[in-house]
Image (cartoon, grey):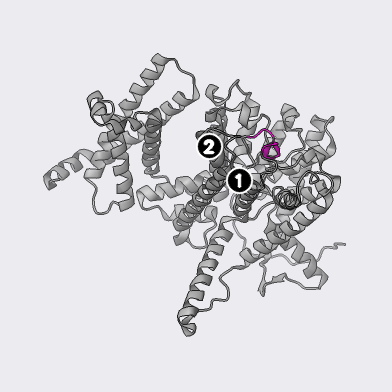
């Protein structure tokens, strides 16, 4: 392209005028997409909608093409590639509208489907919205408030989408739609209607998207894509995102977000692949249905959501004895429950270990030794998780050997016991009849649900690190120590204070939830209600079968409990009280009589 033409196009495109037009077009396109997919239309309306789509695609194609042609050296290569892909996709969709082109080039017929139109509109929307400049100022919203607000926003949108006529086969009430959306966003898994039979493919897709957004957090998606397309961000944004992403350094914020997204999608893709090859084609005959089943359960598993398109989850007769599938899902929700900082630290440790082995093989004298690659947080979380899984599996196996495990083979008993010990820690899938469990096993599940997953993970509960610190504190006090020491490190006082604040607040929220539901639904058993309250707070999703029969008031209580459990009561208090200035004084200290 000549420099004169480039200069002329740059003059036309200047002033961000076309960027704003593109942004408005992309928003209109998504609104049109939602209206199209969410409502039933007659043929004439579908033709009008198709025409409207192309009224957005044509100017969109011209704007994106112009943007590609006038791109400067400052434009990142990855953004330029994305724009060219979008330009080519728009161009192909316009070409197939010409009948003589379609007749001459037959292979273009593959693009003559509405799915490609939907896909291109979504890509266009992501491209334009991510380019908008948004600054998060701590003067208006602190990280806790932003975190809470993002979850409320997704729940609100999810409720609206689930209320659309084409989301369900026979309609859904507002309270049930709100309950389902909250359960999906808070990756809980408690349901008031059967996901597989009550919701259409569109409705199930909405639930799957809500689970993914809830598991990772909308701020993770929005922040990374904004940085991807804009290439820069403000210092205030980085400070805000540092708190949200649990990054150690401000400069690593977007690298951490990138690693989280890549790690999540990679694990989910591998999980979906394994699930697909472990499905019996005689049970799910359609390839499309098997793919959707695999993707849905992989996302639900890794995000610790516990949602399933099966009526009785893995307790269905056709899946009850599919032990490889159980192990795949267990692997997914264990990885999802470990936490992203620990997974990234594990990756760093494995990489260091393999490189050191290679260096020792080549030249033993040049092999570097780093004594502290696996940090204290990772050591505590991994050790605690391993102990809980080991003890939980053993206790479950002993208590349920002649009860719910009796129908399984020797290997099946071990797998089911392992699955039964892992799933209460916020996963929510069940491969046994929960209502048939021994009382002693239920007490074990109460404890496992309460502890939950690990910090900065997709799971809920008080977290493994909190439980570990409380346990270590017992031994420290018993030994007469004035501090907690583990792995030759001293645990900071603020960590101990946070741990016991989280424990106290969790018991308070669960107690209040249990009391209100018992008052509103007195006919329900106290054990079943307590199980429901613990499951909701810890975002587990397991139930003794009373969720759908709860009154509207009790459902609202469970909704609030799920939300508080996902964002944590401590985060809510920080969001409400905002930042308190540190005062430069200290009062005289006195000991309080305890025990």
> Alpha-carbon distance for marks 1 and 2?
14 Å
The residue shown at (73%, 33%) is: 547
Q: Is residue 153 at least partly visible in the picture?
A: no
Residue plotted at (82% across, 70% down)? 478
Query: Of helix, strand and loop, which mostly describes the magenta segment?
Result: loop
The residue mark sitting in front, 1 or 2, is: 2
- Mark 1 element type: helix
Where residue 213 appears, x then y in whole percent? Answer: 53, 42
Residue under the point 27% across and 54% down: 74
For residue 468, side relative to residue 398 (left or right)? left
Q: Where is residue 421 in the image (x, y as percent from the top left)?
A: 73, 51
Q: Which region is colored magenta?
A: 310-318
The residue under label 2 is 292
Instruction: State left or right for residue 593 relative to residue 382.
Output: right
Would you name the residue on which mark 1 appears?
301
Work out whether mark 1 precedes mark 2 in sequence or the reverse, and give the earlier one: 2
């Amino acid at each position: 392209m000549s420099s004169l033409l480039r200069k002329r196009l740059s003059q036309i495109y200047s002033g961000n005028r076309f960027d704003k037009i593109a942004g408005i077009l992309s928003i209109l396109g998504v609104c049109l997409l939602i209206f199209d997919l969410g409502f039933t239309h007659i043929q004439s309306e579908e033709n009008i909608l198709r025409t409207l789509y192309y009224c957005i695609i044509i100017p969109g194609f011209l704007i994106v093409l112009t943007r590609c042609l006038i791109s400067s050296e400052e434009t990142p290569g990855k953004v330029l590639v994305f724009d060219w892909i979008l330009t080519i996709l728009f161009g192909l969709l316009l070409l197939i509208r010409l009948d003589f082109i379609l007749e001459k080039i037959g292979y273009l017929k593959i693009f003559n489907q509405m799915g490609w139109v939907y896909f291109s509109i979504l890509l266009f929307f992501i491209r334009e919205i991510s380019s908008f400049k948004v600054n998060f100022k701590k003067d208006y919203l602190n990280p806790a408030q932003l975190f809470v607000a993002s979850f409320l926003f997704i729940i609100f949108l999810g409720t609206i989408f689930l209320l659309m006529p084409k989301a369900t086969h026979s309609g859904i009430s507002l309270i049930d739609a709100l309950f389902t959306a909250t359960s999906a966003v808070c990756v809980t898994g408690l349901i008031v209607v059967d996901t597989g039979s009550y919701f259409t493919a569109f409705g199930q897709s909405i639930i799957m998207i809500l689970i993914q957004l809830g598991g990772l957090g909308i701020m993770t998606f929005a922040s990374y894509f904004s940085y991807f397309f804009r290439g820069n961000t403000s210092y205030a944004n980085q400070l805000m995102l540092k708190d949200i992403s649990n990054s150690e350094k401000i400069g690593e914020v977007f690298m951490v977000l990138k690693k989280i997204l890549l790690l999540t999608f990679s694990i989910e893709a591998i999980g979906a692949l394994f699930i697909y090859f472990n499905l019996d084609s005689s049970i799910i005959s359609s390839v499309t249905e098997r793919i959707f089943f695999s993707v849905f359960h992989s996302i639900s598993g890794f995000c610790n959501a516990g949602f399933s398109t099966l009526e009785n989850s893995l307790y269905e007769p056709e899946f009850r004895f599919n032990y490889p599938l159980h192990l795949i899902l267990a692997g997914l929700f264990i990885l999802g429950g470990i936490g992203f900082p620990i997974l990234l630290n594990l990756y760093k440790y494995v990489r260091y270990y393999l490189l050191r082995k290679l260096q020792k093989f080549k030249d033993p004298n040049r092999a570097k030794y780093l004594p502290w690659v696996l940090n204290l947080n990772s050591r505590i979380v991994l050790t605690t998780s391993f102990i809980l899984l080991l003890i939980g599996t053993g206790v479950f196996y002993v208590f349920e050997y002649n009860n719910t495990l009796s129908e399984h083979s020797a290997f099946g008993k071990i797998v089911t016991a392992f699955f039964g010990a892992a799933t209460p820690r916020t996963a929510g899938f069940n491969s046994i009849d929960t209502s048939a469990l021994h009382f002693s096993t239920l007490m074990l599940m109460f404890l496992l649900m309460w502890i939950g997953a690990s910090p900065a993970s997709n799971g809920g509960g008080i977290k493994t690190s909190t439980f570990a610190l409380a346990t270590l504190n017992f031994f420290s006090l018993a030994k007469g120590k004035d501090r907690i020491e583990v792995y030759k490190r001293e645990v900071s006082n603020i960590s101990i204070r946070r741990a016991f604040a989280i424990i106290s607040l969790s018991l308070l929220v669960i107690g209040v939830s249990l009391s209100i539901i018992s008052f509103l639904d007195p006919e329900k058993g106290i054990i079943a209600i307590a199980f429901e309250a613990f499951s909701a707070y810890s975002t587990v999703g397991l139930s003794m079968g009373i969720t759908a029969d709860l009154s509207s008031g009790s459902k609202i209580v469970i909704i609030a409990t799920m939300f508080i459990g996902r964002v944590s009561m401590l985060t809510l208090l920080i969001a409400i009280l905002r930042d308190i200035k540190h005062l430069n004084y200290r009062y005289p200290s006195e000991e309080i009589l305890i025990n």
